[in-house]
Image (cartoon, rainbow, N blue to C red):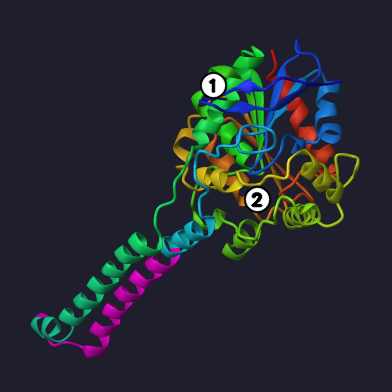
Amino acid sequence: AQLTMPRAKAGGSVELEYETFGNPKDPCVVFITGLGAQLLHCPENSFIAPLVEHGFYVVRYDNRDAGLSTFQTQFPCPNVVRFAIRRLLLDKILPALRLLILASTALSCVWSRPSSLADFLRTRFFSLTVLAAQVVSLDRRLVAAVLKKEVVGYSLMDMANDTISLLDHLRVEKAHIIGASMGGMLTQLVGIHYPERVLSLCSIMSNSGSKAAHLQASTFYQFKIFLRPVPDPADEQACIAHTQETNTLLGLPGQSYNLTGSFADAAAKLYARNPDRSGVPRQLMAIATAPARDESLKRLKPKLLILHGAEDKLVPPSNGVHLHSIVPNSRLVVIPNMGHSLPDEAMDHIHAALIPHLKETSP
């Protein structure tokens, strides 16, 4: 039976809305949702119910700036488009421009075939130095003027601390921590910084924070997901359509959700609970500005189960492979026919890996 609990106090003025399922005397499982997700994104019927049947006490909650938890409106809403342009310029365009200058320098040496160093300095070096100085100046002007730094209201670590505050509120000494997408990042941070509070970890469709190029989704796909205009919260049909379209982009066509229907049904329930999506840019900035966790994950103590969809376009499966390669005490399971979502069709595969993982690490 579901019990709707009072809010849990977290850091500062943050309060977390949460729900519990099962017997509080059973081993506790906490599920952390992803970017902009509400606790309903952890499906009750298809995901939670089997865990309760196997003797676990399950907790799901809204992160800060999502669902019915506290929205951090004291922080200005970051300009995600401007930040994305800044990252594109600094990470890709300007390095390519610098490489072009180096290449042109080398080619000029070949084509001009200077008879001596003095001849090269006299004919080519001065003009190339001026060009390089202009590019450096362009770098500084772009960063300073066009790409002003966005305000980051809080960090992923602050959000991970919220999870510990929730455990304190529930008087749970240790728990299994499961997180999906951004929630997987928070799960990793809880395991890194609070191993004494963890029975086990499960990171679903997430990453280590590495910026390696082969681990990234295509720039076009990221822009398609994150930079689509968000409709007015008062426009119910537009908001439901927007959520349904996002779910379609993240998942696979025709899949069902929570044993109750389609993702369109889920979108309507999410809107009825809270249509406000204003916290998404602040959460996104916390992700974008977080340092990579690779070195800390190499020393991770709790046992980690890594679940990743074989068809995930937002966080490609190579991220699960990379995470498994750096965490010694980990196991990777790639789920067939699963994108960046938790559809009914994937649940048998998920539980086949997850339930034994939870049982073998429970007291």
Frontmost of labels 1 and 2 is 1
Nearest the eye: 215 or 8: 8
Q: Secondary structure at mark 2?
A: loop
In the rendered view, does 228 fall on the left or right side of 240? left
The amino acid sitting under disc 2 is: Pro
Between 285 and 304, the residue placed more toward the observer is: 285
Q: Kindly identify the amino acid type of the residue bearing the numbered disc 1.
A: Pro
The reply to whether the C-beta atoms of the residues labelled 1 and 2 are less than 8 Å apart is no
Q: Is residue 243 left or right of residue 111?
A: right
* Quadrant position of the C terminus in the picture: top right
- Residue 96 rendering spot, x and y as whole percentages: 40, 70
* Residue 156 drawn at (x, y percent): 52, 37
User: Which residue range is magenta in the image?
Assistant: 92-117
Q: CA distance from mark 1 to mark 2?
A: 26 Å
Instruction: State the mark number for residue 317.
Output: 2
Q: Residue furthest right?
A: 260
Which one is nearer the viewer's eye here, 81 or 110?
A: 81
Number of other residues with Cα within 10 Å of mark 1, as a class: few under 14, some 14 to 19, many 20 or more:
some
Residue depicted at 53% across the width and 60% down the height: 81
Left or right? Give the position of 126 relative to 352: left
- Element at badge 1? helix
Give the number of the disc on residue 195: 1
Residue 43 in the image: state x and y as whole percent: 80, 36
Determine whether 10 is above or below 155 in the image.
Answer: above
